[in-house]
Amino acid sequence: MSSSGAIRGAGSTVRVGVGDPVAWTTLAGIESFDFPDQPRPELDTTHLGSPNDTEEAIPGMRPVAVWSVDLHHVPGSPTEVVLTGLEASGEPMQLGLKEGGPIATEKVFASYVKGYTPKGLGPKGVMMATLSVVVLAKIQE
């Protein structure tokens, strides 16, 4: 183990869930991913009496984010079937992201599939696709 405690991302997972109770599908073929970025904007609250001639602000609402990831495209696979179905229906879903490591917990986001697009199909290399998900809110830490 490194002196900082850093570990590799092996064992990390991305999954999507639909229905009640939620039926989960782990997405296969993801080589790496980032967490959605939803930074709060600052809302200007500066007024004539702001102290020391300094601007003031309060945090605004988190914006909707578009989260994208590249993954292996395997026609007819459970991953491809669920993602193309969710893209076609626009059905709300849960996006579960879990980093590797012994104490990691899954973060779950309310979301829907914006697009699932095969790309770069050629005679050499792995067939890939890009998944785009609209992230509305984190619903579980």
Image (tube, rainbow, N blue to C red):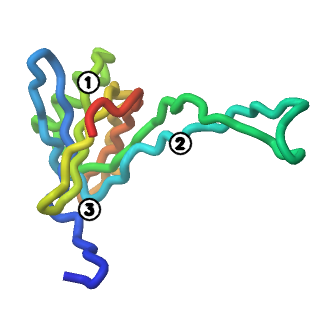
Of marks 2 and 1, which one's residue comes earlier in the chain? 2
- In the picture, which quadrant includes the N terminus? bottom left
What amino acid is labelled 2 in the image?
Pro
Give the residue at mark 1.
93
Where 76 falls versus 37 (above or below)?
above
> CA gap, disc 1 to disc 3?
31 Å
User: Looking at the image, is mark 2 or mark 1 nearer the viewer?
Assistant: 2
Residue 86 location (% of width, % of height): 26, 23
> CA gap, disc 3 to disc 2?
36 Å
Residue 99 is left or right of residue 42, and the answer is left
> CA gap, disc 2 to disc 1?
22 Å
Where 133 falls versus 97 (above or below)?
above
Give the residue at mark 2.
39
Of marks 1 and 3, which one's residue comes earlier in the chain? 1
What amino acid is labelled 1 in the image?
Met
Of marks 3 and 2, which one's residue comes earlier in the chain? 2
Residue 118 is left or right of residue 17, and the answer is right
Give the residue at mark 3.
125
Which residue lies at the image location 66% right of the left edge and 38% below the top edge? 42
